[in-house]
Every structure is written in structure tokens, then in C-alpha cells.
Image (cartoon, rainbow, N blue to C red):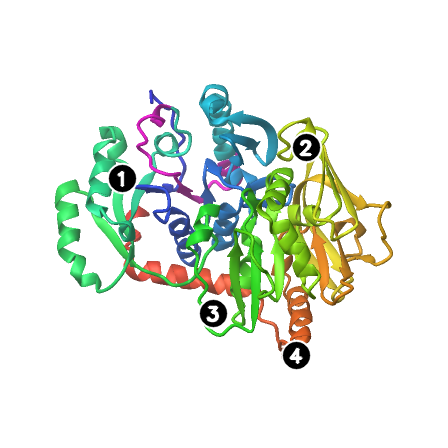
Amino acid sequence: MGSIEKLQPIKKPLMVLGTSSGAGKSLTVTAIGRILKNLGEEPIPFKGQNMSNNAWVDCNGGEMAYSQALQAFACGIVPSSEMNPILLKPQGNSISEIIHLGKSIGITTAKNYYKDWFFPGWEVIKKSLNSIYERHPNCRLIIEGAGSPVEMNLIHRDLTNLRVAKYLDVNCILVTDIERGGVFAQIVGTLELMKPDERKLIKGILINRFRGDLSLFEEGKKWIENKTQIPVLGIIPWLDDKFPPEDSLDLLERKSFVTNPEIKVGIIKLPSISNFSDFDPLENEESILIEWVMKSQNLNKYDFLILPGSKQTIKDQLFLGESGLSKDIKDYSNNNGNIFGICGGLQMLGTILEDPFLKEGSKDNSDLSIKGIGLLPLKTTFLKEKITRQINSESIWPSSTEINGFEIHNGVTVLDRSQDTLKINPIFKELDLGWYKENNQGGTIAGTYIHGIFENDEWRNQYINLIRRSKNLPLLDKKIRSYKMKRESIIDNLAYEFNKYFNISSLLN
């Protein structure tokens, strides 16, 4: 990796490395952030490079990974794209959009990324770190690694693991997931592949997702410590609380805990799904069961259907047509179905999608203009520039209430005047943020550009009450429990559990 210059923060940063992807790095950083906040410190999360289509928009319109935004909430601070200076948004076929400090700056193939973008990437990481420390000299960075730090074919171009660890001379924690099996080999193998100056940065080992009696692993703990000469600082038991997944593949592993649901929701699992954290507020509703729809089927078992955001709207619309799901959605609409689209989902509910600059997954010129599902008289044209901004607006439907959220999308949507537009109405006072119409057969078809719409408690309750009213269910109590307060309690519980089983004090000296 070569010699790396060093930055010397006042307070020793902590870094969470993992023996693999999915080891629990994101949640560990989230827990540590809240623990340190409760101790009166000034924690700030950081991940030099993340790859995810689950994004957040900061106050300046900058894109960042949602996981770093969640970690910022845990630290009690406002998310900023400096906390995730490089975001790679996959577009399929080993191609990704590159976001530097919140702004889209190009497209790259996986093959060319390290050749073309490694040095600019390292510079933007250093710029972000310096900026954070200039404004918060007494902060303690809680840094998340990516994947494994010892991918030997990539380690010479690793931007976000050991290079950052050396630059800041951090105290590293190596996290491993015992649920996956092979925990001893994971730990020892990872350490054996590190160089001596890298291995000395590992100050502790954390074993995650242990099921059963913790005392049964006492001999295993001693073996690891004798073999590695590194203390096992904690064994975290399996936690039931649900958190946003880092990667959309994890959606397949998520199981609903609702046993007697009053409402069933189907969410179309698009190949290029994005911003799936939009649905966390619904997953935390005790009366709602969520199922992911991945293939053609009769959708009438669902009380409402959601078309989520998409990183490649044209590509996903073609998938809906080829898979038969587009017809299924139309049939569902004709049977009193309630449908709600978010961002790309809104665009697909329209009549026409035009992609003159091949920005949204068009394969060639034959896809420059395609038909949408056709349930809303809307026409979308994808332009060169992306819209990213926070939203503060007021809804008109299903009730009048203040709305907060954010936009991340390419494309401008207008009414399709070649269609009957008399029955379509704006959802918000800012007229181009969303539309709805009453279905002739009953139910509603609606869509919005606002990500985070279901985090708005009053709006979410009123929309759910539309569904409950149609099923003759009692309406939700007006005493609304705030989703954001519930998210806070989940983070508090996560930190409490980690604090019980994790000796963090040795890392803070």
C-alpha cells in the first residue's frame, strides 16, 4: 500500500472493520455513536466510500448513504455528505454512478474504477476528514470500513479500510458474525493477511449475533485471545429489532414479525430498487404485514401495493412488462386496488417515459421513449441533471399537514395532455411533487417524488386510514406515535444492548 501520511486528531478515532460484508459494521458504528453521545462526547460517523442505492440527501442537497445518515442520527447530529465523501450507486452491468461530496461527477465500470478514480477518491476522503476536524477539533470519529480489509486483489487500491486506518492511526475493532459460521477462521484468517503495522491497529475483537447461552463460548473466547493476543471486547447476542439493510439483497432475508396483520402491503421488488428505507415506518406498524413481490402473480391479496424508487427506471419498467407484473398491477387497479408509487415508481405509473440522454437504463435508441404502466396521465422526461434537495411542503391529500422529506431523481414529470387529466389532482401544495386520482372501481392510485414520505406521522396515518376505512376497520388512534421517536428508541435499545456486552472503555484512551 506504500507509506501514508498521517493526520493526528486530538481524540483517537475508532474504526469498525469486518471479517466480511454483512458482519454488522453499520449497526456497531450506530451503537457506538449513541454510547459515546450518552457519555458526553462528540461522536461523528464516517465511511470513506460506500456502495449503495439506499441514499439520503443532506441540507445542501448532497447525496450520501442512508446508513451514514442513520449513524449521524445516533450521534445526535445533522447528516452531512462529508461523513460519506464517496458514494457509488450501482446501475447494473458492473457500472456505477460516482458521487463525490454529495455531487454526481461521473459513471465508471468496475474495471476502470481503481485506474481512473483511486487518486481523486483519496483526495476527496482527505478533504472531508480535514474539513470535519477543522470544524469539530474535539470530535471522535467513528469510522466504518467496507467489506473485508484484506481483499488481496484490491488491497493496493483500498480507499476505505486500512488506508484510512493508517492515515488517522485509529483504534480498530474487528467485527465478525458468528451466525455465518467459521468464526475462528474468519478472525485468524483476516489477521494473518494483515501486515504487522496494520495488525497492530486492531485493539479488540467483537463477535456479533450470538444465539444462546453466552457462557458456552467462554472457551472459544479464550482460544481466540490466546491465538491472536488481541482481547475479545464483547460478544453481542442476537438482537430482534429491525434496522435498514445496507444492501438490497438483504431484503430477501427480512422476515415480518407481524402475526395477525390487519393490512397486507405488497412492495414490488424491482431489479434496480433504491431507497428501500422509505418503508421502515410501515415495517414498524404493528397492524401491517409487508411482503416483497418479485414475480407475476395475482395481487388481490394486498390491501395496497407500492412501487418503490428505482436507479434505472426504464430498465425496471421493461422488467415489469416482460415479467407480466405490469399487467398484474393493471388488473389489481381494476379490482379496487390501492397503489402508491415513490419516485421511479411514480414515473412508471405514468403513460410515457422518455430518456433522450440514456440516463435511466435505456439499452439503446429503441428505448428512448417507452410506455409506462399507464394508470396516471403523466409524462416523464429524463434530463442530464439530477434533482437532489430536501423538501418542506404541505399536503392537500389525504389530509392537510406539514411534510418533510427529500428528492433524488432524474426526470421532470408533467401532466400528459393527450390523456384525460380531469380526475388527477396534486397531493401537495407544491404541485409537481405528487399526484393522485380516485379509481373508477374504487381505491386510489397515487405517487410522489418525496422520499421519506411515510416518516411523516400524520400523513402516514391518514393514508393508512384510507385503507382501513375501505376494509371497515376501526381508524388508527389520533394519538400518533412518532416514527422518528420510535427510531430513537430502537437506537437507544441497540446502544443499551451493546453497552451491556461490549467493553468500549479500553478503546477511548
Instruction: Tell me, yes or no, whether the highlighted magenta stretch contains residue 46.
Output: no
Direction from residue 74 to residue 203 in the image, left or right? left
Which dot marks residue 317?
Answer: none
Q: Amino acid at mark 3?
A: Val
- Residue identifier under label 1: 202
Residue 18 in view in this figure: yes
Q: Is residue 64 left or right of residue 372?
A: left
Quarter the N terminus occupies: top left
Cα gap from disc 4 to disc 3, whole angstroms: 20 Å
Q: Which residue has dot 2 on it?
A: 367
Residue 484 visible in the shown view = no
Q: CA distance from mark 1 to mark 3?
A: 40 Å
Helix, strand or loop for disc 1: strand
Name the mark nearer the viewer: 1 or 4: 4
Q: Residues within 10 Å of mark 2 (few under 14, many from 20)?
A: some
Foreground tag (2 vs 1): 2
What distance separates the C-alpha of mark 2 from that of mark 4?
44 Å
Q: Residue at x 48, y 38 (%)?
A: 51
The kind of residue on which mark 2 rests is Asp
Badge nearest the viewer, 4 or 3: 4
Q: Relative to 311, is 109 above or below?
A: above
Q: Which mark is residue 472?
A: 4
What amino acid type is highlighted by mark number 4? Asn
Do the residues bearing badges 2 and 4 touch, measured as CB atoms within 8 Å? no
